[in-house]
Image: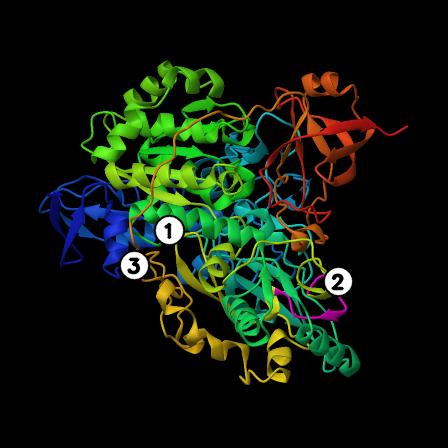
Amino acid sequence: MEKIVNFKIDGKEVEAKKGETILQVARKNDIYIPTMCYISKTTPCASCRMCVVEAEGVDGFVLSCNTPPTEGINITTNTAELEQERINIMKLYDVNHPLECGVCDKSGECDLQNKTLEFGVSQQNFSAREQHRPVHHWGVIDYDPALCIMCEKCTHVCNEVIGDDAIDVQFGGYSSVIVPKGSDTLDCTFCGECTAVCPVGALVGADFKYSANAWELSRVPSTCAHCSAGCGLEYETRHHGINTSSSIQRVKNNFEFSSLCGAGRYGFDFANEASKDELAFNKAVKTVKNATAIRFSSMITNEEAHILQLLKEKLDIKLFNEDARQFAAFMKAYSSVSGKLHHSASLDAVKQADAVIVIGSRIATDNPGVRYALTTASRHNGAKIVYAHALEDALMQNTITQFMKYEAGSEEGVMALLANTLLKDVEVDEETRAFLDNLDLGYIEAESNVGDDELLLMMKSFKRSLNRVLVVGSDLFAHEQAQNIARLVALIEKYTEFSLLIVPTEVNTLGVSLICDLDKDENTSNVVGYNANGDYIISSLEGAHLAVPALNQQEGTVVSIDNRVLPLNVAVTFDGYTLNDIANALELEKENTIDYTRELNTLAGFKPVAFDSLENFLTQYGEDERGYLLDEVSCVTDGELSDVDELPEFNGTVIYHSNPVLQFNAYTSGSKHLENDATLKGSAQFAQAARISDGDEVEISFASTTVKRIFKLDSELKGTIALNPSFDNGLDLNRYKFEKSKIVRVI
């Protein structure tokens, strides 16, 4: 039983759980204690001293942010002495603070402004010599040290949540500043979280600077459209005139409890523009009606997926989406052993874990939300994190405790080794035990390059762990043995204390897989592409025959990695046609796309809830009240494990299709705020093997595809595997991500 501490705050009886501070308990009980440096998702900074309280029997003031209560103690939060202390603190903060509120980007939402007014600081008793402090330009971030109050929120969130550990405090009394860590310039993933937590205008987005005041902006709550993490955000829009439409000025998040990557924060400029072209619309309707198939991406809402499924049934056509089809097949194989339709873990479960295995994903770029959860687990829980992959990842070096390098293509064997190790002393059914006993461990270890010593080290590090999570990535969905890998994953979840998180590839891969009956894509003619390639293209992207709205221009829902159905809202209007207009022309007859929200597939766990009934907020305690969780669905357990036979070999020059930081799809590719780094990155060893040099233009051939890239040496990469981005060229990435390739220097 968890120990409970009973005590009083301002005469009110309250309870504290193990590890909770006085401030946390006060907030849970709606008791106000002012702070300037505290943020819920990090350890206390304890730099502002604004949160001081009086504790009965204790001389002097107590910092409530980092002090746990003791049984029966009486805490007082508001006395004349405390008020004066806080006034003095505010006067120190206000010493020579530039009077730039009229032009400062933080004006109207500045914590320093708010607290100065709250404590009535209208005159100053302190002074300090004015210093020249030039503004620093760090890419998409600007830092003004003259406005900085040294709360240290930025350094804490960078280190404890994001994992970049890119900024530090250079102490020097009144001359103290924030500086890039170990570099003259900021070397980070540019998530912008430091700008989000900054309580003043010291850290701001460079592109937003001087463009608008807070009170001019309207906030539209929505969900990020770039990966499957389902991060909540607010589009801040501004209307430019009577006859003009609104535009997105910036993106914000509830930084107290959640985080955004740079793609979510800065890659917002993907709204589509169109007017109603009746001729083009009629052509689109006719083309869809006569099509053989519709090929579509997972960058769509659940409602659009439902419309496509209805069109399939009505018109007797095929639906192609290899991303979602492969994911659905993987999950079906998983369900055949687990007996459940949905995986058991969430991002919060990862944050709370003390032992994690990550396999089959370059997770830092595939899904930053998972990376941030892993960083939180590492920094706050001391979690032991085993990262299994064919490639090391410099972005994860500060977080993982053990890197388990395996040979490309050997994931089935590695998963079998993990299952054998984790289930060695666990009671399982006869068929499972027979399968494990029949494994050729010597062969698998030799071919996968994962030895028994590594597995024993992993088990030793997990010995005292209580909250364990297995994270499975998108490398595995297109693997030749994907279904057997899925069954092995299910075994681990079924018989061990590991909960399971399966990472979908795109923003709504999971939702599409639950709604649509998908066909295997084939080389056929008369295919309509919906946000995808086709003979006739209907898309929110460039080059469409008929334009439709992007995901920041629609009402609808997506399903996140947490199995949560999340709402999207219209940030920017769209004057053209929608998929629902086409559906109505083909006699499906719903007034609005969101009229389909309550009709989503209940057999897959969706609830018959209307769109306008969906909540979209985090509580003051950080609880997620956005949308709803999918209902759990039971499945028939008829899955059978296949023997692990011969593991594939990937020799010579191998390409790994992996996007760079902040690039996910065609939406981010077109953003003017994000770096479009479409280069082939490889090690010196790779360059030698491929007989190419840094800066060479190369032609890469694999399968039936040929692309041209500029080759860039990357000192952080090792081996003869190079990283090839795919966000910019429409490559068919629904194949296994590692691929043998022929590389020729273009002369």
Tell me which segment is drawn in magenta. Answer: 540-550
Query: Residue at coordinates 44% horizontally, 60% vertically from top-left?
Result: 514
Badge 2: few (under 14), some or many (20 or more) residues near its Cα, within 10 Å? some
Q: Provide the secondary structure element on which disc 3 rests.
A: loop
- Between disc 3 and disc 2, the foreground one is 2
- Quarter of the image for the C terminus: give it: top right
Find residue 35 and name its label: 1
**Which residue shows up at 21% across the image and 36% down it?**
429
Query: Which residue type carries mark 3?
Result: Tyr
Identify the element where label 2 is drawn: loop
- Amino acid under disc 2: Asp
Query: Observer-nearest residue: 251 or 697?
Result: 697
Q: Position of residue 297 (x, y in %)?
A: 61, 58
Q: Name which of mark 1 and mark 2 comes first in the sequence.
A: 1
Q: Find numbered disc 1 in the image and state the secondary structure of the residue it sits on.
A: loop
Please indicate whether residue 613 sits to the left or right of residue 526 in the image: left
Q: CA distance from mark 1 to mark 3?
A: 9 Å
Left or right of residue 735: residue 729: right
Residue 535's disc is: 2
Say which label, 3 or 2, has the lower sequence index. 3
Mark 1: which amino acid? Answer: Thr
Q: Which residue is mark 3?
A: 32
- Give the farthest residue toward the right: 747
Q: Quadrant of the N terminus?
A: top left
- Indicate yes or no whether the magenta region holds residue 547: yes
Place of residue 30 in the rendered image (x, y in percent of width and height, measured from the top left): 26, 62
User: Distance between the Cα atoms at labels 3 and 2?
Assistant: 61 Å
Q: How many residues crowd mark 3 within 10 Å: few (<14), some (14–19), many (20+)?
A: few
Q: Is residue 85 visible?
A: yes
